[in-house]
Image: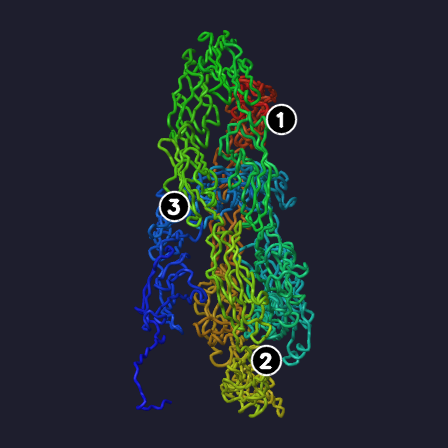
């Protein structure tokens, strides 16, 4: 404090200076900035400038500002590696590290302005700096090469595929355009925006199968960048070419007798344009014909029955189908014509003939029987000649005409000696015989006596026949008229039968009838057959006896009976079950057991017996209708089947009621029970949890380090819902586990042994894993498919096929041309890079190797220079694969250098002379000029070729070996001397080394002239594109012979040439017949053209057709297309040749195959040598800028017009290691939670290396860590830093912060190392422990549990200390409570199971700790409420059941089902039904008659209902469920069935009736009774049965009266009428009520008519009256009488009378007006005799009438019979021949039965006296000829042979004899001359000839000889040669075999 005293003050000036305090923060001006700069900007480029000011004291440190940059999002610890700031000026500059926009498109930085005050104040702003894109990235395709497929014929616009490319730039720099690299034609287009390649033109695989071209992608940047990729499109074949048969139709012939599977023919179709399955052809026949076809070969064969006689030809279609997806077809219409063979035996129309013949038939009389035969081999055009024979049984009494088969009497007959003849007949064709028999029964006309019309009688009668019932009619005959017959039953069957005799048959005057009738009651079961005897006695006491057999017909009067002990049946046994059912139902019982797995089928067979027989004993089996769905029974055999599979779990016991019904009328039934006990079976298969598993495993790494634990592959698990052993599973591989490579145990798959991928046929194992259950007797299995892929490692060294290769080349082998080395290959069986090979030579002085391992010379080779050192160069070639580590293989290559030819041949003399005769044959060697030449070279360099330069007129041929041959015959008169100028040249150097000489050929004289061509040789050039049928040349040949031999014909005799050329025979024009091809067929053809005159003199000329080349083949690039070449970027130096393309051109030099190469456009720094195709660099290429370049190369030939081909050389630039790895930042920081678990990734680094491949691959490692324990805590995994151990923030041993020093090293050579970077990792603490439940189980409670009762207890724990756990129910609904502290659960209310929501409760139990934050967990507890049986069953719909049931309802029928319901669960709702019995009044209790199925409630009756006995039943049924019961009442009304057949008073009735009864005359009435009621008693009557027309005579009324319908009865037509009367009742019932016992008729869809019938037999006997006159059996009776005879029986007049009483006796007399005729007749039998001798000349024919008179009553009746008698002649004239002698000529070739000639004789007598027969008497001892005895035709019987002198002429005496008695005869001679026929084949003598291999054309090799046994012209021989293959020809007259060529070679073929 200052004490102020104003008195003591003084004033001085005071200056107060205010010092600045740094209290103002700098301010940016402006406060926002927008900067941008281009990527890759140069160092110190100004990006922008910031400014700030500070209002503190100017020019003080408080206002002086400094700027700084911070990049918080890039690196928080250093300045930006890309930008810097001038701290004073605020200028932001680019640093030395260029920025890449593709990494950072903008930079966010913080600029801080800081003043220099104390303390310093600062302000910061955030800048967003945009990095502008530059076009510094080349587009890149996502693949180095694209390979696509496209179907040929794809529609235009079809998408092939898409090429994809990306560009790391932005904007327009990244916008891409796609295009094709070149504009050459291709049928594709590309979308320039998307890269989608589509079809733009027709794609045809047959024209071009592979397309390759370059696709270029270009960005829109400036300058634009582009990349090219190779696209290869393979055209996939589609099935667009059908198979083609060569013809549309095919006709073949085939013998009908061919055996099965015989080849008929072979058809062939071709499909050459398609490939693969599209060209595979299958054949088929789509017709029902007896032929098959081999689907692969086209062989048609017989596979069915064929018969010419049934069908003579077959027409069918053969289909040729290719195997393409859309199959294409061609068809061939085939006609198979059958060749007829004699394969059918002639057959008689009947196998047995019978004929009755009077014993007095005269000799020669023809039997009136038609015997015919047929032969199936006969056709409309070919008739098989048949000949008939009698071969036995005739005893010379009968003969047969061999042609007509007419049988005649040949000798006198006598019935008493031989009563019948069984004659054997045969009919024959040329080689086969048919057989028949003819039974001729002689009829005795001179005896009488009773004869039964049957040797025995058999009758049939029903066992219930009434007394008097007709059984059988017996007839006997007595040929004596009016001789009555009596019948006596001498054995009557104990009086059971009687006979009614003397019943005459007026329609047969010789017959008498009797009836056998029933006389007592019959029983078939007591006696079935009666053997009776009947005797017929005529008035003369002549007797005949015949047996009668009476068979009783069974009537259905016995029920079927099931066998008493059915347990004896196989597989059937009794059991307590059967005993129980038997006692309950009183029915037979069958019991059997069957497995539930048994397939539906036979269970057992029931069996019944029946005393009846036939249908009455035939039981038909059926089962109750309610079993129909499960079971069925064979109605005939009683076999019981199940149609549905058994299921033991559903129903294990089946009770079936079987009914046996016999087939009688009425039907009778029996019932039995069948109990089927179904046994449980193992019927569930194991099932895998998935059908297919896929696993992988590395080869050679299958076992672990201990070699004991198997390598784990995977787990495949299956389950089986069966129990016990049936559900226990074991596993095994059932297929695909080759060499037991894998093991499976409990579904775990492991490797058994070391795997080697290369030794496996497939690196993918396709295994079937099977799971099998434990049932050993009936195992079930389940399968799954397991694929295990074995992955490759580099474990195979590259190998060459050989350890050493040897190759030879000459010293002038061109530089740079690949040396072909046979068999040179190298291989590496590894995959991918492991199998990629790189080649290197040990010495590259003379040779080098291509990347593909091909050797080529690098400099010219000089044999002399090299030979001084070595004759061969040995190189070591190594192949290194691309594996890691790489493996190396090597081989030796020995290349031998050969010398070349440098000396030529020389003739020894300048002039050479040879002599030759003009008769010298063509092809004769004249001289061997090789002997006249020397060449100082040796071996192959001394080979010469010879040519005639001049002087050759076509007569000579000089082959290249110097052999001079004569080509044609010489004519000294025309040319005596030939001078040939001959050239010899070195075969290898034909231009450099040649010599000439003059060959003088002196022709020696001979006398001959032959046609001669104007030239001996013709050289005809023909362009290869000449069209077929073009004329190529016209030849001229002359012949100086006379005109007789002068005309010349031309031909070619070379079979190999004729398909290509032909010559016009007259004008000698040579014509092309098939196309030529210089490249693929022949370049020249050499053949002879022949000229032949009429004298067979032949001249020829050698023709050489030279096929000239046309430029029709474009150059073809050789090697694999396209070319792939790899060159590393550090080798791309200007001038370096890196590849050579090679081509071939099938055309010929000098122009058509001369190739020029060019690169189509500028694609890079390349140039190509236009001649060699070598491609070189013109500058360097940087891999980082360009990775692949497609070089389009075109090869063009020198043809006109020129043809071109284009390909690509794909140059792959490989990388050099010229870039180091770079971390994206020098340091990194990261925070991780303590909950992170190993091996989690805690940080990912960004490291780049611009190199590629191994050079661009790098490994990051931790070089150092702080603290050191961090080295074990973190590891490097690629670019990821992973946690390697557990961490826990609370664990003191865990370092909280780790600093890791990082380093990256690439894999290049040498390896490059990055700069270091650091990573700081800090662990963050977490609350990491939650409470957990102790194990608890779901629980159940009964529904009657009370409230507040204990249910269960839950416990829990928490590893954290002092954590309290609280329990709660999260989803509580009030049913349960839980203690919060103790977890005890109790009920909170009562439950009712019948309420659905009460049945199950799912509680979510939760626990929570009291941690911060608190952790909780929840788990579900399921509480199930169990049902208690607390509800009684209730009948539905009510407790009263009332039904109607028809009587006779089968006892197995379920009458109704009682049904109950129960609110409890099914287990508590099981109801058992029982019938409630009345124990008080059991006798009248209806309940005892019924049973109820305890399970199903089905009510059945134990007995059949019978309405007539009782029609109402009432009883109660009880339903019991445990202690709960309910009762229902059942009422059953029995309805009437129409089950009573109407009963007639007498089942068989008999009545007599006069035949003239009038209409409505009553015959009798039928009485009927029916016990049914109501409509079931409606009775109707109907007449049925009887013979046709019987029912028309009678009718029956509604009350059963039988009466005559109309007065048309006639005893003569029918004497007895047996008609049936059907008595019916009928009723109508609903369709659903029909039973098997009902006889029903359909009325409509709902009603059926039930009918009961009974049949009555009514026998009506007519009584005869005399109402018919006698009838003459013939209109005219004719007889023959030989003149001059007396009292001869001429004929017998016979008349009949249809009446059967007095009219049966007839009297005959000559009509009284004819008293003057000389004949008489016996009155009782009608025999006519002549009274005097008659004369033919006086009168030949007599005609008159005989009367036949019956003895009928009131009046008698008469018939008039016409008679004619003819007087016959005697034999008194001899036969006379029409010639004195006969002369015939016959060829020795005449076949057997061939005609020789005809002789003829006549006889003036009549009838048989004038009939003539012929036969040989002598001269035919050898039997060569035969004569038809009727026609006189002479035929050949055995072949004649002119070559046998004894058979050249014959003289035969022939006789002609008439058939009179005695016969008269005449004779004459036949002269037969045999003529020669060419019937002997020439016999050739084996000929063996020798010929020099240098023999010339025309040389005779051998002369053929042969003989012929024929005469005259038939023995003149001609010779022909086959199989000579054009090497030889033969003179057809002399047999001389001539050489036809100059090309025999002993070393090739020793013999021909």
Q: Closest to the observer: 1828 or 727?
A: 727
Q: Which residue is mark 2?
A: 1359
Q: Secondary structure at mark 3?
A: loop
- Percent across and percent down for residue 337 are 48, 40
Q: Are marks 1 and 2 in contact (CB under 8 Å)?
A: no
Viewer-nearest residue: 1618 or 1345: 1345
Q: Find out whether the residues at labels 1 and 3 contact each other: C-beta distance under 8 Å.
A: no
Disc 1 from disc 2: Cα separation: 134 Å
User: Of circles 1 and 3, which is in front?
Assistant: 3
For mark 3, does the 10 Å Cα neighbourhood hold few (<14), some (14 to 19), or many (20 or more) residues? many
Tag nearer the camera, 3 or 2: 2
Of mark 1 and mark 2, the one earlier in the sequence is 2
Q: Which callout, 3 or 2, points at the residue further toward the start of the chain?
A: 3
Where residue 1608 sits: x, y (%)? 44, 63
Q: Is residue 696 above or below residue 313?
A: below
Q: Is residue 179 visible?
A: yes
Residue visible at 32% across and 89% down in the picture: 8
Q: Residues within 10 Å of mark 2 (few under 14, many from 20)?
A: few
Kind of element beneath mark 2? loop
Residue 786, quarter of the rendered image? bottom right
Residue 1809: % across, % down: 54, 32
Checking the image for residue 1822, the label placed there is: 1
Q: Nearer the viewer, residue 752 or 598?
A: 752
* One can see residue 1813 in this view: no
**Residue that label 3 marks:** 203
Residue 1114 lies left or right of residue 829; in this view the side is left
Between the C-alphas of marks 3 and 2, the distance is 76 Å
Q: Measured along the vertical axis of the image, is residue 998 above or below residue 1075? A: above
The mark found on residue 342 in the picture is none
């Amino acid at each position: 404090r200052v004490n102020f005293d104003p008195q003591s003050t003084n004033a001085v000036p005071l200056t107060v200076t205010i010092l600045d305090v740094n209290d103002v923060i700098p301010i940016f001006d402006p406060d926002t900035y927008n900067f941008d700069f281009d990527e890759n900007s140069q160092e110190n480029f100004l990006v922008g400038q910031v400014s700030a000011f500070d209002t503190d004291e100017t020019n003080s440190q408080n206002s002086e500002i400094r700027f700084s940059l911070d990049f918080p999002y890039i690196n928080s610890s250093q300045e930006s590696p890309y930008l810097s700031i001038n701290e004073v000026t605020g200028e932001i500059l680019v640093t030395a590290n260029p920025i890449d926009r593709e990494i950072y498109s903008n930079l966010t930085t913080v600029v801080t302005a800081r003043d220099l005050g104390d303390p310093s104040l600062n302000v910061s702003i955030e800048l967003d700096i945009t990095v502008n894109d530059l076009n510094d990235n080349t587009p890149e395709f996502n693949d180095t090469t694209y390979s696509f497929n496209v179907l040929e014929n794809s529609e235009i616009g079809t998408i092939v595929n898409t090429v994809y490319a990306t560009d790391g730039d932005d904007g327009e720099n990244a916008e891409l355009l796609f295009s094709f690299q070149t504009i050459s034609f291709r049928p594709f287009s590309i979308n320039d925006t998307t890269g989608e390649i589509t079809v733009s033109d027709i794609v045809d695989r047959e024209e071009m199968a592979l397309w390759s071209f370059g696709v270029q992608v270009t960005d829109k940047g400036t300058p634009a960048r582009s990349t090219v990729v190779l696209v290869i499109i393979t055209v996939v074949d589609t099935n667009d070419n059908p198979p083609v048969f060569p013809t549309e139709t095919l006709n073949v012939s085939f013998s009908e007798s061919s055996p099965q599977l015989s080849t008929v023919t072979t058809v062939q179709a071709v499909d050459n344009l398609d490939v693969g399955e599209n060209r595979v052809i299958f054949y088929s026949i789509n017709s029902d014909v007896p032929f098959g076809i081999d689907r692969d070969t086209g062989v048609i064969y017989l596979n069915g029955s064929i018969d010419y006689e049934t069908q003579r030809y077959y027409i069918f279609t053969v289909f040729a189908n290719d195997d393409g997806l859309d199959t294409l077809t061609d068809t061939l219409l085939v006609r198979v014509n059958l060749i007829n063979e004699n394969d059918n035996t002639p057959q008689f129309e009947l196998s047995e003939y019978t004929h009755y013949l009077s014993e007095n038939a005269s000799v020669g009389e023809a039997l009136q029987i038609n015997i015919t035969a047929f032969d199936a081999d006969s056709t409309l055009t070919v008739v098989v000649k048949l000949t008939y024979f009698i071969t036995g049984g005739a005893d010379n009494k009968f003969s047969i005409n061999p042609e007509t088969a007419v049988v005649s009497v040949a000798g006198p007959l006598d019935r008493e000696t031989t009563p019948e003849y069984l004659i054997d007949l045969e009919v024959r064709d040329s080689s086969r015989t048919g057989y028949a028999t003819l039974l001729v029964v002689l009829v005795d006309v001179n005896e009488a006596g009773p004869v039964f019309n049957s040797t025995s009688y058999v009758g049939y009668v029903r066992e219930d026949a009434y007394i008097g019932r007709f059984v059988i009619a017996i007839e006997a005959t007595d040929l004596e008229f009016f001789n009555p017959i009596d019948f006596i039953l001498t054995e009557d069957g104990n009086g059971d039968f009687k006979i009614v005799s003397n019943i005459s048959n007026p329609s047969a005057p010789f017959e008498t009838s009797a009836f056998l009738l029933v006389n007592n009651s019959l029983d078939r079961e007591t006696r079935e057959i009666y053997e009776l005897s009947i005797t017929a006695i005529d008035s003369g006491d002549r007797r005949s006896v015949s047996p009668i057999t009476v068979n009783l017909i069974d009537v259905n009067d016995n029920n079927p009976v099931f066998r008493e002990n059915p347990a004896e049946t196989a597989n059937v046994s009794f059991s307590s079950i059967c005993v129980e059912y038997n006692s309950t139902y009183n029915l037979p019982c069958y019991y059997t057991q069957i497995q539930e797995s048994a397939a539906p089928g036979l269970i057992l067979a029931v069996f019944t017996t029946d005393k009846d027989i036939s249908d009455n004993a035939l039981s038909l089996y059926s089962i109750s209708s309610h079993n129909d769905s499960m079971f069925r029974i064979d109605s005939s055999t009683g076999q019981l089947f199940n149609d549905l599979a058994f299921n033991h779990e559903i129903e294990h016991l089946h009770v079936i009621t079987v009914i046996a019904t016999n087939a009688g009328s009425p039907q009778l039934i029996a019932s039995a029970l069948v109990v089927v006990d179904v046994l449980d079976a193992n019927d569930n298969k194991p099932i895998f949890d998935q059908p297919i598993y896929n696993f992988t495993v590395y080869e050679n790494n299958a076992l672990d380090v201990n070699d004991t634990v198997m390598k784990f592959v995977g787990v495949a698990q299956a389950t089986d819902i069966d129990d016990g052993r049936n559900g226990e599973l074991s596993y095994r591989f059932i297929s695909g586990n080759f060499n037991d490579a894998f093991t499976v145990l409990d579904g775990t798959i492991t490797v058994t042994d070391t795997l080697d991928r290369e030794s496996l046929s497939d690196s993918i194992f396709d295994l079937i894993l099977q799971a099998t259950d434990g049932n050993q007797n009936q195992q079930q299995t389940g399968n799954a498919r397991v694929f295990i892929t074995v992955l490759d490692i580099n474990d195979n060294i590259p190998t060459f096929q050989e350890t050493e290769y040897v190759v030879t080349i000459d010293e002038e082998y061109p530089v740079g041309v690949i040396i072909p080395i046979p068999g040179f290959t190298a291989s590496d069986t590894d995959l991918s890079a492991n199998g990629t090979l790189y080649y290197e030579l040990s010495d590259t002085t003379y040779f080098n190797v291509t990347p593909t391992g091909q050797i080529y010379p690098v400099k010219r080779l000089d044999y002399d220079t090299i030979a001084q050192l070595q004759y061969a160069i040995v190189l070591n070639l190594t192949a290194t694969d691309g594996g890691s580590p790489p493996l190396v293989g090597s081989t030796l290559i020995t290349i031998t250098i050969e010398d070349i030819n440098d000396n030529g041949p020389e003739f020894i003399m300048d002039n050479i002379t040879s002599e030759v005769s003009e008769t010298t044959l063509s092809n004769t060697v004249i001289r061997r000029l090789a002997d006249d030449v020397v060449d100082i070279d040796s071996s192959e360099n001394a080979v010469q070729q010879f040519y005639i330069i001049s002087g050759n007129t076509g007569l000579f041929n000089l082959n290249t070996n110097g052999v001079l041959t004569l080509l044609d015959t010489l004519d000294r008169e025309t040319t005596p001397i030939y001078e040939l100028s001959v050239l010899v040249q070195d075969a290898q150097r034909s231009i450099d080394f040649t010599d000439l000489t003059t060959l003088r050929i002196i022709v020696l004289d001979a006398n001959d002239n032959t046609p001669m061509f104007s030239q001996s040789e013709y050289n005809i050039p023909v362009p290869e594109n000449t069209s077929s049928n073009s004329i190529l040349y016209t030849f001229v040949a002359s012949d100086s012979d006379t005109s007789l031999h002068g005309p010349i014909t031309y031909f070619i005799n070379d079979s190999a040439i004729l398909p290509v050329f032909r010559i016009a025979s007259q004008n000698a024009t040579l014509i092309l017949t098939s196309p030529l091809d210089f490249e693929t067929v022949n370049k020249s053809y050499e053949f002879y053209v022949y000229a032949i005159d009429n004298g067979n003199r032949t001249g020829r000329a050698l023709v050489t057709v030279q096929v000239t080349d046309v430029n029709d083949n474009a150059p073809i690039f050789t090697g694999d297309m396209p070319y792939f070449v790899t060159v590393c970027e550090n080798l791309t130096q200007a001038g370096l040749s890196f590849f050579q393309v090679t081509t071939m051109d099938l055309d010929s030099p000098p122009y058509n195959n001369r190739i020029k190469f060019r690169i189509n456009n500028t694609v890079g720094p390349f140039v190509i040598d236009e001649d060699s195709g070598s491609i070189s660099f013109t500058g360097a290429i940087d891999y980082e800028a360009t990775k692949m370049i497609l070089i389009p190369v075109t090869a063009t030939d020198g043809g006109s017009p020129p043809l071109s081909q284009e390909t690509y050389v794909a140059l792959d630039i490989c990388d050099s290691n010229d870039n180091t790895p770079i971390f994206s930042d020098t340091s990194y920081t990261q925070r991780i939670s303590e909950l992170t678990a190993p091996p989690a990734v805690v940080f990912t680094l960004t490291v780049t290396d611009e190199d590629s491949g191994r050079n661009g691959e790098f490994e990051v490692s931790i070089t150092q860590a702080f603290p050191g324990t961090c080295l074990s805590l973190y590891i490097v995994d690629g670019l990821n830093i992973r946690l390697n151990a557990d961490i826990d923030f609370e664990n003191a041993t865990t370092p909280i912060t780790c600093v890791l020093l990082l380093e990256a090293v690439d894999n290049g050579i040498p390896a490059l190392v990055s700069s270091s970077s650091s990573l700081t990792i800090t662990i963050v603490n977490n609350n990491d422990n939650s409470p957990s439940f102790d194990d608890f189980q779901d629980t159940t409670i009964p529904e009657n549990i009370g409230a507040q009762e204990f249910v269960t207890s839950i416990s829990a724990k928490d590893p954290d200390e002092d954590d309290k756990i609280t329990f709660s129910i999260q989803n509580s609904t009030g049913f349960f409570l839980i203690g919060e502290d103790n977890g005890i659960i109790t009920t909170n209310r009562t439950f009712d199971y019948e309420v659905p929501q009460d049945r199950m409760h799912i509680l979510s139990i939760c626990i929570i700790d009291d941690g911060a934050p608190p952790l909780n967990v929840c788990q579900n507890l399921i509480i199930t409420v169990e049902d208690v049986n607390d509800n009684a069953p209730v009948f539905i719909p009510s407790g009263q059941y009332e039904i109607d049931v028809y009587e006779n309802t089968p006892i197995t029928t379920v009458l109704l089902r009682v049904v109950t319901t129960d609110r409890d669960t099914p287990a508590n709702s099981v109801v058992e039904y029982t019938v409630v019995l009345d124990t008080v009044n059991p006798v009248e209790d209806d309940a005892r008659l019924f049973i109820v199925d305890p399970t199903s409630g089905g009510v059945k009756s134990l007995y059949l209902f019978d309405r007539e006995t009782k029609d109402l039943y009432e009883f109660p049924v009880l339903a019991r469920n445990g202690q709960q019961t309910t009762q229902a009442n059942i009422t059953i009304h029995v309805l009437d069935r129409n089950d009573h057949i109407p009963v007639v008073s007498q089942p068989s009735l008999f009545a007599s009736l006069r035949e003239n009864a009038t209409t409505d005359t009553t015959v009798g009435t039928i009485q009927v009774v029916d016990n049914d009621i109501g409509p079931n008693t409606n009775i109707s009557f109907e007449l049925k049965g009887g013979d046709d027309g019987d029912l028309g005579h009678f009718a029956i009324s509604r009350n059963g009266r039988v009466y005559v319908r109309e007065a048309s009865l006639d005893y003569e037509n029918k004497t007895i009428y047996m008609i049936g009367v059907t008595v019916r009742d009928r009723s109508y019932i609903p369709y659903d009520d029909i039973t098997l016992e009902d006889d029903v008729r359909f009325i409509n869809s709902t009603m059926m008519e039930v009918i009961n019938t009974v049949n009555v037999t009514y026998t009506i006997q007519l009584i005869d009256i005399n109402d018919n006159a006698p009838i003459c059996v013939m209109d005219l009776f004719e007889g023959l009488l030989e003149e001059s005879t007396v009292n001869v029986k001429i004929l017998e007049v016979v008349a009949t009378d249809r009446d059967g009483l007095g009219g049966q006796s007839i009297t005959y007399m000559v009509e009284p007006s004819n008293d003057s005729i000389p004949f008489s007749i016996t009155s009782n039998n009608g025999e006519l005799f002549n009274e005097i001798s008659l004369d033919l000349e006086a009168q030949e024919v007599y005609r008159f009438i005989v009367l036949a008179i019956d003895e009928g009553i009131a009046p008698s009746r008469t018939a008039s019979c016409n008679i004619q008698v003819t007087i016959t002649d005697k034999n008194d004239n001899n036969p006379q021949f029409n010639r004195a002698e006969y002369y015939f000529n016959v060829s020795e070739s005449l076949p057997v039965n061939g005609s020789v000639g005809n002789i003829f004789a006549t006889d003036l007598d009549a009838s048989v006296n004038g009939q003539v027969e012929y036969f040989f008497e002598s001269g035919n001892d050898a039997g060569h000829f035969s004569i038809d005895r009727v026609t006189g035709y002479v035929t050949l019987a055995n072949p004649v042979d002119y070559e046998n002198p004894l058979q050249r002429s014959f003289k035969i005496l022939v006789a002609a004899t008439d058939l009179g008695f005695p016969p008269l005869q005449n004779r004459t001679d036949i002269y037969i001359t045999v003529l020669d026929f060419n019937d002997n084949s020439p016999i050739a003598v084996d000929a063996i000839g020798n010929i020099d291999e240098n023999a010339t054309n025309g040389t005779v090799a051998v002369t053929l000889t042969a003989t012929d046994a024929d005469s005259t012209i038939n023995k003149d021989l001609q010779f022909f040669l086959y199989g000579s293959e054009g090497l030889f020809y033969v003179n057809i007259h002399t047999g001389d075999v001539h050489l036809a060529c100059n090309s025999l070679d002993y070393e090739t073929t020793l013999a021909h």
